[in-house]
Image (cartoon, helix red, strand yellow):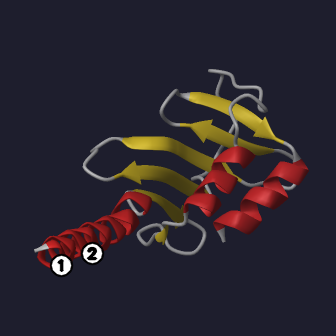
Amino acid sequence: MRKLWLSIYLTILVILVACSSQSLPKEISSQTLRIVNKTVSPSEYKEIRDTKTIQMILNVVDEDELRWSYVKPSIDRESDYQFWVEKKNVPERHHHFEVWLNDKESVILNKNKGQYAIIESTTVEQLNGLLK
């Protein structure tokens, strides 16, 4: 009788472990960063699902590190990059940015807040490397 209960217990345990390990990738991949490189193709985008890479990109444009303003700088063209985070079953775009790269002065727009910031050259190099 004990062997029967033990085998039932082990079977349930194996099923629970198998089901829980299958659900992990869904949670990890529930966040996607989409990048549009408008200099290449304004209608195609690249997807990043790796949470570490997403966090690295968001850290580069950390809102506390940049001086944000509602005043729009003089920009006479379309942005070079646009990127945003999408979460599973959430229709809004999170962390939605546009970036204008320039030799003298690069600009980033936080589309969620309608704020602009000037990006330093080191930040531009980091961001450009991560977005490509």
| Element carrying mark 1 | helix
Q: Is residue 49 left or right of residue 129?
A: left
User: Which is nearer the eye, 89 or 94?
Assistant: 89
95 w.r.t. 69: above or below = below
Residue 42 lies, in percent from the top left, at: 47, 67
Seen at 45% across and 41% down, the residue is 94
Q: Is residue 60 visible?
A: yes
Q: Is residue 48 left or right of residue 18?
A: right
Q: Residue furthest front?
A: 1
Which amino acid is tagged 2?
Answer: Val
25 w.r.t. 82: above or below = below
| Element carrying mark 2 | helix
Q: Quadrant of residue 67?
A: top right
Q: Is residue 73 visible?
A: no
Seen at 66% across and 71% down, the residue is 132
In the rendering, which numbered label is found on residue 14?
2
Q: Which residue is mark 1?
A: 3
User: Which is nearer the eye, 28 or 38?
Assistant: 28
Residue 40 lies, in percent from the top left, at: 57, 75
122 w.r.t. 21: above or below = above
Q: How many marks?
A: 2
User: Which is nearer the eye, 17 or 42?
Assistant: 17
Q: Are marks 2 and 1 in contact (CB under 8 Å)?
A: no
In the rendering, which numbered label is found on residue 108?
none
Distance Cα–Cα, label 2 vs label 1: 16 Å
Badge 2: residue crowd in 10 Å (few <14, some 14–19, many ≥20): few
Which amino acid is tagged 1?
Answer: Lys
Seen at 32% across and 69% down, the residue is 17
Residue 61 lies, in percent from the top left, at: 70, 43
Q: Is residue 74 left or right of residue 110?
A: right
Q: Which is more N-terminal, label 1 or label 2?
A: 1
Badge 1: residue crowd in 10 Å (few <14, some 14–19, many ≥20): few
